[in-house]
Amino acid sequence: MKIAVISDIHGNLTAFKAVLADIETLGVSDIVSLGDLVGYGPHPEAVVRIIQDRRIPTVQGNHDRAVAEPRYLKWFNPEARRSLEMTREMLSEAALAFVGSRAPFITRDGCRFVHGFPPDSLSTYLFQVTENRLRAAFEELPEMRCFVGHTHELILMGCDGAETERVPFQEGAVQLQADHRYIINIGSVGQPRDGDSRAKYVVYDDAADALEVRFAAYDIQETVDAIIKAGLPRSHADRLW
């Protein structure tokens, strides 16, 4: 079975559509979302509607929680907080209820899916975690494969039961080792921050125990123009390039 794992769409409808079109070419069995459907981008309602219409399983991200429960806005810097307040105004009550009701993690097909860090954090960044905490997480992780988002970067951490290691992770195929546990940080569809402006996602082939990192080009200017028109912070548009 091949599963496309997507994350951090952040209201970027143009990037999301480009990724969905790319997925259609691959013979993928299913799609799983790691959350942060909203925030930063100009079309949060449309993104949520597609997720609902296509019945794409999704966990809750920190931006999703903050728009659904404003007490969590304190997590964010002033600019991001203002952006989320505006995003909340763009969302219907049904969309707010949907993002607010997502679970913190999903397990299926021997894999765990969580926004931030296992087992169920939607706010912890992988790069914040100490070596001791990372090792403990691997020891406690029931699943051999855990997919995370949140950082908007591509990071692959492996553990052979004793030592942890960072494995090179970039566009293309990556063969996993059956006796290693992995935490797979899959990048972002709508707000990449890894030096390449294309939308990112990962396809996991459980039969081959392999990943394919996919980059999808999209019309960035279309999203930039929509961000500016919506009155969202200009920085959200500028960093898309």
Image (cartoon, rainbow, N blue to C red):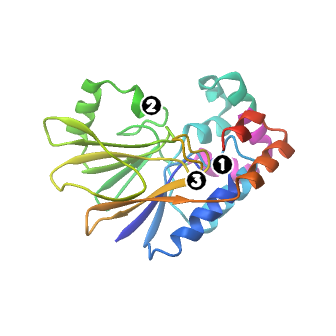
Q: Disc 3 marks which residue?
A: 198
Q: Is residue 239 visible?
A: yes
Q: Are marks 1 and 2 in contact (CB under 8 Å)?
A: no
For marks 1 and 3, the one nearer the N-term is 1
Q: Residue at x 23, y 32 (%)?
A: 135
In front: 123, or 180? Answer: 180
Q: Residues within 10 Å of mark 1 (few under 14, many from 20)?
A: some
Of circles 3 and 2, the one toward us is 3
Q: Residue at x 40, y 39 (%)?
A: 120
Mark 3 and mark 2: span between their CA atoms?
Answer: 24 Å
Q: Disc 2 marks which residue?
A: 124
Q: Disc 1 marks which residue?
A: 97
Mark 1 and mark 3: span between their CA atoms?
Answer: 30 Å
Of circles 1 and 2, the one toward us is 2
Q: Residue at x 70, y 53 (%)?
A: 220
Mark 1 and mark 2: span between their CA atoms?
Answer: 23 Å
